[in-house]
Structure formats: structure tokens, C-alpha cells
Amino acid sequence: MEGEPQTATFEDLSIDDSLGALARVRQYGTSAIALQRLVHVKMLTEAAESVPYESIQTDLFPLLRALSTDNEWVIRQHLGEQLGGVAAACLREAEGEDGPGYRGIIESILPLIQTLLNDSQDEVRQSSGASLCHICSLLAPEDRGRRALTLALQLAHDDEQEELRMTAAKLLNDIVEILGPDLCTQFVSPELVSLAEDPVFRVRKAAALALHSACRVAGEADAVDRLLPAFIRLTKDDIYRVRKACAEALVDMSAAVSPGLRGHVLLEVFTRLAGDASKLVRQAAMQQLGPFLSTLPAAKVSDALLEMFAGMAAADTGDPTLDRDMRGYCAYNLPGVMAAVGPSRWRPFLKEAYGRLVRDGVWTVRRTLACSLHEMVRVMGGRGPGPEGGPGKKMEGRRGSGEEGVWRATRSG
């Protein structure tokens, strides 16, 4: 690591294991040797849990402040990961919102989170954002907006640094379920819509990946009026990377909205992305086809969609790597698609695709089918796994027609 002495000896690197967790992080957390600091920054939560809050306040908080400006970004990253656990340790004595532990979170830990959220290194911002989500769940409802949400909104309003606006999009998506529907409709939804219209395509891409949780939390009215229109605009963005992000987010969006919106609005979106001018967008859409079908009610899964999915088993684009990946996606998602559409659509659409995959020349494709065979039999009406993971009850009489179909497809290779 940068700044580490070149002549460090064994004695320099040795650690006194007889020390308690707090004493160790105090002694080695400010070591001139970066490796020692890294090892002990990962012990911060353990140290906080081993002592009363008074020791956290007097002995640990000063160390946290020093580590937040450490020259090594990986140390700042691990500090960010630890702050959520340290905050939880502050509340162990259950003193409520007026207790010193709660005030310590507000006055000492959240300012450190704010510092790390503005860090130049993405890994540091992401780890501290995850801790902010944890801390938000510990706060009183009235503090979640003004203490936690405010930090995300400050990032979203930074007009100079696109990286901070990108971080804000992900953070808003991660935190919105804790904030609840009122704060979502008042603040999160409009902020995400604004980020979806950002002049920098990387911010729009981040917004495309970050709309689904707000759709789920805000409810259908807000999704229809603001969030879905913003997503649809992004699916038509001039930059293919933004459209590709929309394809990657399609399943999450589908799971977040009502069945009616899935079968109408998002089905049209998928069809358009699957026919996009960019090969990478088309590939991303096809990769999501199986999971997307599994979110739809069976009646909404058209014959054309099933044929498109089954066609992945015989992909022939001229790109061997892409074709292999497509067959892998098909094999991996086939049980979920079968569960969504039911055994009645096995023979006309999926039986031939299954047979092709069973005979595929790539062993990983065949292994994927082998690993899911029990699920296919269960969906088709045969013997499935029991409640403890063992075999369930065997069907009475002859092998069920669904089980026979799967068995014959595997035997045909």
C-alpha cells in the first residue's frame, strides 16, 4: 500500500493478541503501517459492541474521525462498511431518542457518513451509502427525512460532480423503502425523475437502474403519473448504454408494479428493447426475457414471447460467445418460465427447446438443466422436493404426462 514503510520488520507487523478489541483498534488503528490499519478498521463494530457507550464516545469516535481522512481509500471503504454496526452498538442501552447514544449517531456518525459519501472513490461512497441505509432504519421516523434523506438529496443537487449524482440515484433507490410512501412521493420520486433527465448520460443510466423501489413504495398512482413515464423516456434515450440499463432493470420494474402495468406498459417496452438497433441492448433484453416472463400472469405470456424465449436454445447470431450465453440464459430460466405458463404450454413451445439444450455441446448448459431437473418435474406434476429438501410424495399410478414429457426430452439426447 502507498505510504507503507519499505523496511517494515516482523516486529513492526506483529500484533499483541492479549489486548481487547477496543485497545487493539486504538493502538493499531493509527499505525503508520497501512496493513495494520486495514486489519483493525474491520474490527470497529466488534470493538463498539464490547464496551459501553461512554467508551465509544471517548475512545472510538476520535479514531473514526481520523480514519475518515486516511490516505488509503480501501481503509476509508471499510470504515464506511463499519459505521452502520457502530451506530447500532450506540443504541444497545435502549435509552431512546433523548439518550446519549442516539445523539452520538446524529452528532458524530452521520457527519462521517456525509464526508464519506462525498469521497472521490466510488467504493467508499457505496459502502458508506449501505451504512446510511442501516442507520436510517435505526432513526426515529421524524429523523429519517431530515437526517438521512437530506444527505442523499445533497448529493443529487451537486451540479459539479456527476459521480455524486450517480451515487444519489442508487442511494435513493436503496433507502426509499425505509423512508415510506409519504417521503417517497414528496421527495424521492421527483428527485429520481430529475436525475432521469440529467444532461450527463451516466447519471441517466444510474437513474434507470434506480426507479424500481420508488415504484413499489410510492404506489400505482405515482408510478403511472411520474416514474413509469420517466423510465419509458429512458428506454428511448439516444445513448445505447442508457437503453441497456433499462433492459437490465426491466425485471425489477416489472416486479414493482401492478400486473396490469406489467402486461401492458412493460411488455411493450420489452418488445421494443428486444428489437433495439444496438446489439448490446438486444442482448441485455434477451437475457432478461426468462425472468421477465416469470413475473407475468400466464395469460399475458403470448405465444410470440414463448417462441422468442424458446428460440434462444437455437441462437445463431454468428457470434459463438453470444450464442452460448443465450443458450445458458435459456437453460437457467426455463424452470421459472414453465412455472409461470404451466404444463399446458410445454409441448407446443418449450419441449423442443429443452431437447436442444439437453444435447448442447457446452457442458455448463447441460449441467444447468441437470441441476434444475427436479424443479421441472415438480412444475410438470411429477415428484418434487419435500418440505425438508428430500423427495416428496410419489404420484399415484403411471408417470404423469408432464413428467413423461421431461423424461422423454432428456432421454432423446
Image: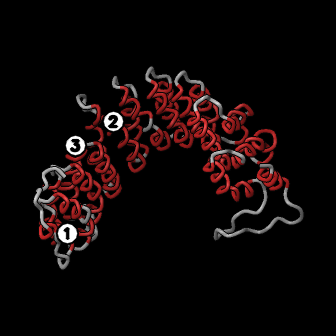
* Residue named by callout 2: 166
Q: Which is more N-terminal, label 1 or label 3?
A: 1
* Residue named by callout 1: 53
244 left or right, relative to 155? right
* SS label for mark 3: loop
User: What is the distance, in whole Å, between disc 2 and disc 3 at their CAs?
Assistant: 13 Å
Near mark 2 (Cα within 10 A), the count class, few <14, some 14-19 or many ≥20, is many
- Residue at 85% of width from left, 53% of height from top? 401
374 left or right, relative to 278? right
* Residue named by callout 3: 119
Q: Position of residue 66 (x, y in %)?
A: 13, 55
34 left or right, relative to 77? left
Q: Nearer the viewer, mark 2 or mark 1?
A: 2
Answer above or below: position of 349 versus 137. Answer: above
Q: Nearer the viewer, mark 3 or mark 1?
A: 3
Q: How is the image coloured?
A: secondary structure
* SS label for mark 2: helix
Answer above or below: position of 313 versus 113. Answer: above
Viewer-nearest residue: 250 or 213:
250
- Residue at 15% of width from left, 51% of height from top? 70
User: What is the distance, in whole Å, between disc 2 and disc 1 at their CAs?
Assistant: 35 Å
What amino acid type is highlighted by mark number 1? Tyr
Q: How many marks?
A: 3
Residue 90 shows in the view: no
What amino acid type is highlighted by mark number 2? Met
